């Protein structure tokens, strides 16, 4: 079955850029939208954005100026870059698959990776 | 931005009892609402979409209802594995896609 796995540094310095990759295994990255969602420790979920396998993106206006997403279909991966991070960006970052069509909910999630922003 | 408000924040329930969780949207989202379950240290998993359609493999004791701005997730007879945090999410009007703050179902 399809599985998602996030990878990237667990510690990022304040003002630098957070970079994460999600690897899709057991299925193709094509024909789906793929999303990033984060969860600060002990708090709720925040949608960051999503990317189509063709590279189209849409993101949360609250983060838009700092977010860059990309996709590499040859590696079945998609990536997130979040610039100018602060302590408020400390969170578990999840990648997830969007159901598709007009259904913008998440039917498959990765296990998540904790990213801590240090000063 | 559509704000999703869940209540109560914490629900204390005994095994075998019925649990009723609420989710309210700041404006109509029609039936475009999903529910997720999150257990400690795990990623959320999809329970319900379209306000009332159970995801594959979700037990029948979970049911969703509502439309517009008022939604309910009901767990008819709580099992030990159901103690978790539950989130609602609207996908009607975006960006951004938005989640509620969650309801923690805990052991009474």
Image: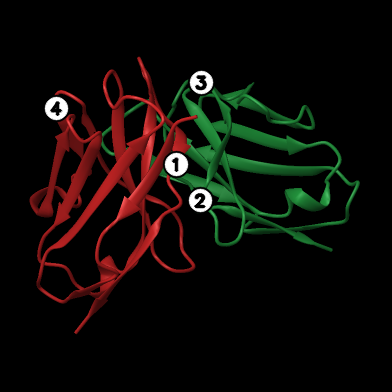
Q: Splitting the image into 4 quarters, where does residue A2 fall? A: top left
Tell me how far mark 3 sits from mark 2, CA to CA. Answer: 24 Å
The colour with which the image depicts chain A is red
* Mark 1 Cα-neighbour bin, 10 Å: few <14, some 14–19, many ≥20: many
Q: Which residue is mark 3?
A: B31
Q: Position of residue B42 (x, y in %)?
A: 54, 55
Tell me how far mark 1 sits from mark 3, CA to CA. Answer: 22 Å
Q: Which chain is green?
A: B
Tell me how far mark 2 sits from mark 4, CA to CA. Answer: 26 Å
- Report the coloring of the rendering: by chain
Mark linked to residue A109: 1
Residue at 21% x, 27% y: name it. Answer: A52
The image shows residue A14, relative to residue B64, as above or below, that is below
- What secondary structure is marked by label 3? loop
Q: Are marks 2 and 1 in contact (CB under 8 Å)?
A: yes
Mark 1 belongs to which subunit?
Answer: A
* Mark 4 Cα-neighbour bin, 10 Å: few <14, some 14–19, many ≥20: few
């Amino acid at each position: 079955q399809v599985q998602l796995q996030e990878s990237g540094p667990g510690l990022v310095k304040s003002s630098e850029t957070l970079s994460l990759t999600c690897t899709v295994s057991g299925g193709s990255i094509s024909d789906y939208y793929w999303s990033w969602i984060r969860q600060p420790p002990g708090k709720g979920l925040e949608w960051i954005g999503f990317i189509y396998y063709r590279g189209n993106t849409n993101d949360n206006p609250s983060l838009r100026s700092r977010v860059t997403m990309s996709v590499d279909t040859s590696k079945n991966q998609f990536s997130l870059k979040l610039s100018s991070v602060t302590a408020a960006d400390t969170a578990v970052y999840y990648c997830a698959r969007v159901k598709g069509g007009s259904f913008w909910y998440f039917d498959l999630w990765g296990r998540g990776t904790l990213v801590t922003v240090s000063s | 931005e559509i704000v999703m408000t869940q209540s109560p924040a914490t629900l204390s329930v005994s095994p075998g009892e019925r649990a009723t969780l609420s989710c309210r949207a700041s404006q109509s989202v029609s039936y475009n609402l999903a529910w997720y379950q999150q257990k400690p240290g795990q990623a959320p998993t999809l329970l319900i979409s379209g306000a009332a359609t159970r995801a594959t493999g979700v037990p029948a004791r979970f049911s969703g209802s509502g439309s517009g701005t008022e939604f309910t997730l009901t767990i008819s007879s709580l099992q030990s594995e159901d103690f978790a945090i539950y989130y609602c999410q609207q996908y009607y009007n975006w960006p951004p896609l938005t989640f509620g703050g969650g309801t923690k179902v805990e052991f009474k």
